[in-house]
């Protein structure tokens, strides 16, 4: 990491097309201006980290919600069991349609 000391009004050049200018200092903060081409994304690190954490939390909550819905329906999230327990299942050949007549 390159560490520089700059005063208000001074700039730092990054490559041929990005300029960072120190606008002013206030107590423990520094206002900077960034001049870069439109195609260059400029994002605050703390915002990117917060969004990443929120996305991970939302994905985890969605997985948890899906699991809870399956559990409420009596279904396994891995493989849905049959609605009829195996011991209660009757083979189709064992059903006599004439018995209902």
Image: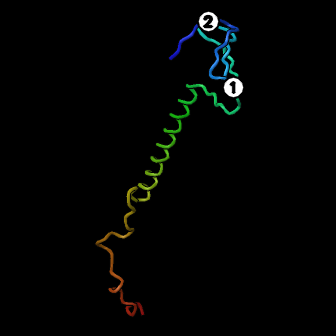
Q: Nearer the viewer, residue 79 or 92?
A: 79
The residue at which mark 2 appears reads as 27
Looking at the rendered structure, which numbered label has been put on residue 19?
none
Give the crowd class for mark 1: few <14, some 14-19, many >=20 residues within 10 Å. Answer: some
Q: Residue at x 53, y 15 (%)?
A: 2
Q: Nearer the viewer, residue 79 or 48?
A: 48
On screen, residue 42 versus residue 74, left or right, reads right
Give the image location of residue 6, x and y in percent: 62, 8
Give the image location of residue 87, x and y in percent: 28, 72
The image quadrant that residue 85 belongs to is bottom left
Q: Residue at x 43, y 51 (%)?
A: 67
Which quarter of the image is occupied by the C terminus?
A: bottom left
From this view, report whether residue 55 is shown above or below residue 18.
below
On screen, residue 48 versus residue 72, left or right, reads right
Q: Nearer the viewer, residue 69 or 50?
A: 50
Q: Which of the marked residues, 2 or 1, is nearer the chain's N terminus?
A: 2
Q: Residue furthest left?
A: 87
Secondary element at tag 1: loop
Q: Are marks 2 and 1 in contact (CB under 8 Å)?
A: no
Q: Nearer the viewer, residue 82 or 49?
A: 49
From this view, report whether residue 39 is shown above or below residue 10.
below
Front label number (2 vs 1): 1
Give the image location of residue 98, x and y in percent: 39, 93
Give the crowd class for mark 2: few <14, some 14-19, many >=20 residues within 10 Å. Answer: few
On screen, residue 82 versus residue 11, left or right, reads left
Looking at the rendered structure, which numbered label has been put on residue 36?
1
Give the image location of residue 82, x and y in percent: 38, 68
């Amino acid at each position: 990491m390159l560490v520089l000391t700059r005063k208000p009004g001074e700039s730092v050049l990054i490559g041929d097309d990005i300029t960072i200018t120190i606008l002013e200092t206030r107590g423990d903060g520094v206002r900077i201006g960034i001049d870069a081409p439109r195609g260059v994304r400029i994002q605050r690190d703390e915002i990117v980290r917060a969004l990443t954490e929120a996305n991970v939390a939302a994905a985890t909550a969605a997985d948890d919600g899906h699991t809870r819905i399956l559990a409420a329906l009596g279904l396994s999230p891995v493989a849905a069991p049959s609605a009829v327990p195996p011991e209660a299942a009757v083979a189709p050949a064992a059903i006599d349609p004439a018995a209902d007549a």
